[in-house]
Image (cartoon, rainbow, N blue to C red):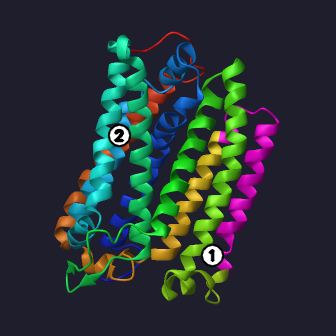
Amino acid sequence: MMTGFFDLPTIWAFVIAFAVFAYVVMDGFDLGLGILFPAFAPGPQRDRVMNSVAPVWDGNETWLVLGGGGLMAAFPLAYAIILPALYAPIIAMLLALIFRGVAFEFRWRDARHRRAWDFAFTAGSIVATLAQGITLGALLQGIAVEGRSYAGGWWDWLTPFSLLVGVSLVIGYALLGATWLVMKTDGVLQLQCRSLALRLGIATLVCMAAVSAATPFLSGAYYEAWFAWPRVLFTAQVPLLVLICSAAFFYSLKRDHDYTPFLMALALFALGLAGLGVSIFPHVVPQAVTIWEAAAPAASLGFMLVGAAVLIPIILGYTAYAYWVFRGKTGHEGYH
């Protein structure tokens, strides 16, 4: 299998990266609403927050399944190494996603215990997001590998850096949730969300700066990836674009735009994913296993790619249709 920008392992690496970004786009603001839920008054205000995402929330995790399933099928060696290293945060994430899904449904059907279900919705959202961030941080800081197996301990994933990434993702998802509500609501609730978005935007940029400053010093390979000449001419465009998107974000909030803050928040996440790609590509297990070493046989990758080429446009199509049907501001009536 030749190593290049158009071989099957590289294509599958971009497919999985796209699935991860689509998950962040689709489920990030959803989790962000749960994180922010205690900031809203019980009753009609919280109901309206839930109604803003009720028609679409349960399809958002499709991309998580595609990303995880794609990793297992396309890069089985990486899957076999990463899963034992990150069992604890991954299991915590999955359980939290199940718990918050149950809470989402039952808060409408069990009104007597709605406060308990609201707490479960918030707790599930925070735990799921924190676990996702810790998983990303632990992967980025490196996994101990000997031969073709994980060689580390049970608690290797828990470090100050992984916690920093976890907390940063909680703040970032909260920003997506606030800007989603700026787009989907009006009146007093929208004003409240604009104020939240302003503070969360500042906090998100501080967290991005902290993670970005720490990452190059995790490994000499990361430092080279960002600062080696002439590669630095390319990588320097990432922080430059972050500055431009940040300026557009704060300007749009000041001008009371409805859609631009959400789009600029998504752009910041896209640039964060680009920065992650700069740091680890072409490794799928950072500093240990490349995408070519971890890839399944070419015949398997080609067969699966045909299926992905059919299914991904279908998923994008029905997702776009669902969001189009439920476009516009969310009223006080519910979809439950």
The answer to whether residue 320 shows anywhere in this view is yes
> In the picture, which quadrant includes the N terminus?
bottom left
Which residue is at a point 67% across and 52% down the rendered structure image?
203
Relative image position of residue 188 (x, y in whole percent): 71, 20
Relative image position of residue 330 (x, y in whole percent): 57, 19
Task: Measure how far apart labels 1 and 2 are at the Cα level.
Answer: 32 Å
- What type is the residue that disc 2 sits on? Ile
Disc ID at residue 315: 2
Report if residue 47 lies within the magenta region.
Answer: no
Closer to us: 313 or 197: 197
The answer to whether residue 305 shows anywhere in this view is no
- What type is the residue that disc 1 sits on? Thr
Which residue is at a point 56% across and 87% down the rendered structure image?
224
Closer to us: 154 or 200: 154
Residue at the disc numbered 1? 235
Which residue is at a point 30% across and 50% down the rendered structure image?
92
Disc ID at residue 122: none
Q: Name the image quarter holding residue 275.
A: bottom right
Q: Main secondary structure of the magenta part?
A: helix
Label 1 neighbour load within 10 Å: few <14, some 14-19, many 20+: some
Relative image position of residue 103 (x, y in whole percent): 34, 27
> In the picture, which quadrant includes the C terminus?
top left
Compared with residue 328, is residue 144 higher up or lower down, i.e. above or below?
below
Element on which disc 2 rests:
helix
Decide if residue 10 is on the left or right side of residue 272: left
Relative image position of residue 278 (x, y in whole percent): 52, 74
Q: What stretch is highlighted in magenta?
A: 233-261
Element on which disc 1 rests:
helix
Label 2 neighbour load within 10 Å: few <14, some 14-19, many 20+: some
Compared with residue 229, is residue 127 higher up or lower down, i.e. above or below?
above
Tell whether label 2 touches label 1 (CB within 8 Å): no
